[in-house]
Image (cartoon, rainbow, N blue to C red):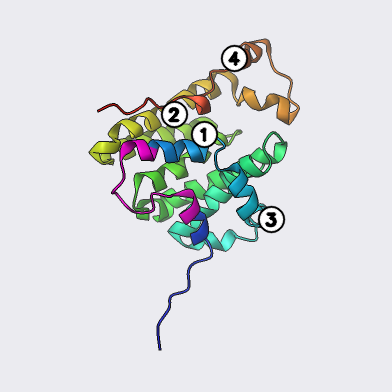
Amino acid sequence: MTNSVEKPEWQDVLDFWFPERLNPDFDAQAHRDYWFWRMRGGADEAIIARFAGETEKAARGELDHWAEDPHGRLALIIVLDQFPRSLWRDTPRAFAQDGKAAALAMEGFSNGHYAALETPWYKTMCLIPLGHCEGPGHLDRLDRAIALAREIHAEAPDFLRDAYAFAAEQPVEVLKVITAFGRHPHRNAVLGRVSTPEEEVYITAGRFPHLRELPEKHD
């Protein structure tokens, strides 16, 4: 008789989203490539094919029990914050779960779940909703994200230090936008919002924080 441990239902999300797993044996360029695959639409087709059902369930609150575990909470944050941007790209639903994802992240900071995550790439995914979620408390959430991103950078392995220096600047850049406009102007058209003249200038320039380029790693 063999003993088998049933895989948690959220494990497929983490295995898909993090090809790195918990393995430190990959190079900085591979990590960069994984990051941009995740964050720039490269995973869209696979997310739609594999995780449309989970994304719908999460949006309805049917996966809230995942948050009872640190890794389940991380997976739920990803499903709520990242997968809608693939599944419902260029529609209001892409942003509809931002508030819930941010609330899950904030709760994880206080209940020990964030601290239990083993890698900088796991922890960084908990910070992203703090920048995404518009509305009351946005500046305070970004201040928290900046402080935590700097901690992640300081603790990152040497070969990933440049990557996490870049990541630590991301919430700083988002803070500039939210301080100036109180919202993400690049969403205005999708959300049916009227842009101010100042926002029109910003949108036309197209220098959005989420489109910043991570410099290539040179030896």
Among the 4 quarters of the image, the one containing residue 143: top left
| Rendered image: mark on residue 170 | 2
Q: Earlier in the sequence, mark 2 or mark 3?
A: 3
Q: How packed is label 1: few (under 14 Cα within 10 Å), some, or many (20 or more)?
A: many
Whether residue 17 is in magenta: the answer is yes
Q: In front here: 28 or 75?
A: 28
Q: In front here: 196 or 34?
A: 34
CB under 8 Å between callouts 2 and 1? yes
Q: Please identify, in this view, whether the residue under mark 4 or under mark 1 is nearer the observer.
A: 4
| Rendered image: mark on residue 60 | 3
Q: Mark 4 falls on what kind of element?
A: helix
Q: Which residue is mark 4?
A: 202
| Rendered image: mark on residue 131 | 1
Q: Is residue 61 left or right of residue 66?
A: right
Asked if residue 137 can be seen in this view, the reply is: no
Q: Earlier in the sequence, mark 1 or mark 3?
A: 3
Q: Is residue 21 left or right of residue 37?
A: left
Q: Which residues are magenta?
A: 14-31
Residue 6 in picture, x, y percent from top left = 47, 73
Q: Kindly identify the amino acid type of the residue bearing the numbered disc 4.
A: Tyr
